């Protein structure tokens, strides 16, 4: 663990995410896992299966954040162009990786299936990539520079991510406490702002919920230092308590 | 309706989306609605509640696409900074809108509630904005230039979007047909690529599913011209049929 803040971005690739046909499940999963290990996810972009758009987004993100994680576009069909786009972004050839060819060839042979030209497409990656193991369906993802390229199918994305996480540097975790508040934001905004001002090393967020024609809020205090976290949390809880008493008078 | 293609982007704003605490529901909804009316959603970005990040992303997106839709950060609390950031991006003052002040003031008065300083924050918007009606909780969203600023709470986002959609220009709808295919991508990739080549005015996508230790695919044909759509769809269905027969031999 390092004391510095480690930042990350995600690039989700696929027309189907932008047409609404597929509802992304990988962004939320990645966010959960990175938060848990102490890496700050700072930006997400979703782009279509268009090479220039992938290249531009990837280059913007990999220059800005410590890590970039991508999902989608590494299958065998004509619309799977992620390996080519990542190669172009890094300015290296996209080629059949010898180790991946062996791994996949052996796997198809063991299953009595032909290792066709299209299946071999899944062994293509930018020269110099390191494999990300795929325990679900063999065809590996890959890591090049600070970019981790993974499948879009959620079960495979998750399995690949499990293999990547232990290899990453992680920062001091942003600790978090959540307080349910029965009042709407309009009621709490001023005292909550004052608590934020009094606890500058914390991040206090207010998330409105609207259910049964009534607003309530979830208040979330975050800090890297536990003492500061607890102090701000207690101030928020005291505020909610005070407002509850005031309502009963 | 216009024959040109109408493009759009979404900017989802909020630390909670990047920490994993909130799983976004607005991106998928917007994608569904825009696809249905004939607007192509071409990019999505998720950014934290940080002014510079919102300004930079908004300026990149509004210069590239016909429309930009934002979600989140328009409530009354200190972490709601979207109105300020959008004003900064457009280079105009962020100020209490007289019409919004009246609307909200009347509403709170009718409910016997005080129209506090923090509630008045929700009436702030960039000078020159047009309201987006909020039938759920009164405080309006706003439109300035080609940007539509809406709430992050899904029920309110959806209600605001319903009010926005009829005011937009829409393009020729991208029609879509979906074909379930019992084969994995490795089996279909070559014939599917050939169908794509033979039907250049269509977009043929292949979306793998992995369930019960078995891959299958959903094949989606899209086109703006119905005859071309149907021709490509029939070719894909014939391919699936032919592969099914081949498997039984």
Image: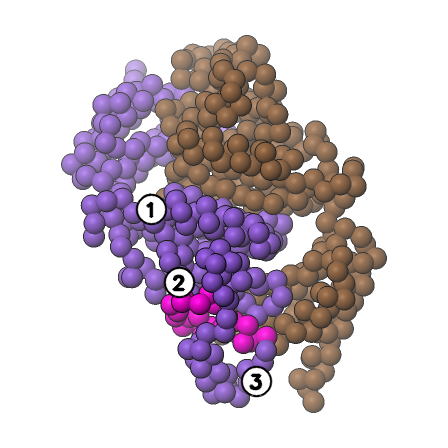
Chain colours: A purple, B brown
Question: SS of the residue at dot 1?
Answer: strand
Question: SS of the residue at dot 2?
Answer: strand
Question: SS of the residue at dot 3?
Answer: loop
Decide which of tag 3 and tag 1 comes sooner along the chain: 1
Report whether residue B37 is seen. no
The x, y position of residue A199, in whole percent, is 23, 27
In the image, residue B74 sits, relative to residue B41, either above or below, namely above
Tell me, for residue A114, which label it has, or none: 3
Near-viewer residue (A44 or A65):
A65
Q: How far apart are marks 2 and 3 (CA)?
A: 27 Å
Is A126 in the magenta? yes
In the image, residue B249 sits, relative to residue A226, either above or below, namely below
Report whether residue A188 is seen. yes
Q: Are marks 1 and 2 in contact (CB under 8 Å)?
A: no
Q: Is residue A219 toward the left or the right of residue B221 in the image?
A: left
The x, y position of residue B48, in whole percent, is 41, 37
Marks 2 and 3 belong to one chain: yes
Residue found at x 61% / y 20%: B130
> Given the image, what chain letter belongs to the residue carrying mark 1?
A
Decide which of tag 2 and tag 3 comes sooner along the chain: 3
Which stretch is magenta?
A118-141
Residue that badge 2 annotates: A143
Q: How far apart are marks 3 and 1 (CA)?
A: 42 Å
Tell me, for residue A7, which label it has, or none: 1
In the image, residue B198 sits, relative to residue B128, either above or below, namely below
The x, y position of residue B52, in whole percent, is 42, 30
The x, y position of residue B33, in whole percent, is 65, 42
Q: Is residue B43 toward the left or the right of residue A154 in the image?
A: right
Q: Do the residues labelled 3 and 1 touch (CB within 8 Å)?
A: no
């Amino acid at each position: 663990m390092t004391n510095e803040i480690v930042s990350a971005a995600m690039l989700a690739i696929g027309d189907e995410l932008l047409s609404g046909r597929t509802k992304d499940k990988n962004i939320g999963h990645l966010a959960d896992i990175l938060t848990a290990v102490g890496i700050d996810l700072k930006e997400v972009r979703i782009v279509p299966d268009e090479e220039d758009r992938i290249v531009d987004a990837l280059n913007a993100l990999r220059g800005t954040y410590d890590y970039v994680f991508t999902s989608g576009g590494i299958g065998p069909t004509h619309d799977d162009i992620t390996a080519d786009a990542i190669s172009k972004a890094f300015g290296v050839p996209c080629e059949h990786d010898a180790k991946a060819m062996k791994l996949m060839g052996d796997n198809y042979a063991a299953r009595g299936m032909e290792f066709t030209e299209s299946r071999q497409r899944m062994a293509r990656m930018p020269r110099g990539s390191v494999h990300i193991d795929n325990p679900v369906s063999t065809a590996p993802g890959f890591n090049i520079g600070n970019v981790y390229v993974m499948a879009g199918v959620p079960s495979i994305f998750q399995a690949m991510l499990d293999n990547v996480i232990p290899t990453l540097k992680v920062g001091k975790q942003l600790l978090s406490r959540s307080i349910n508040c029965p009042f709407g934001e309009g009621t709490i905004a001023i005292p909550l702002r004052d608590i934020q001002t009094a606890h500058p090393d914390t991040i206090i967020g207010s998330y409105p919920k609207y259910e049964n024609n009534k607003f309530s809020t979830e208040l979330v205090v975050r800090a890297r230092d536990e003492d500061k976290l607890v102090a701000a949390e207690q101030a928020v809880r005291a505020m909610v308590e005070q407002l509850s008493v005031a309502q009963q008078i």
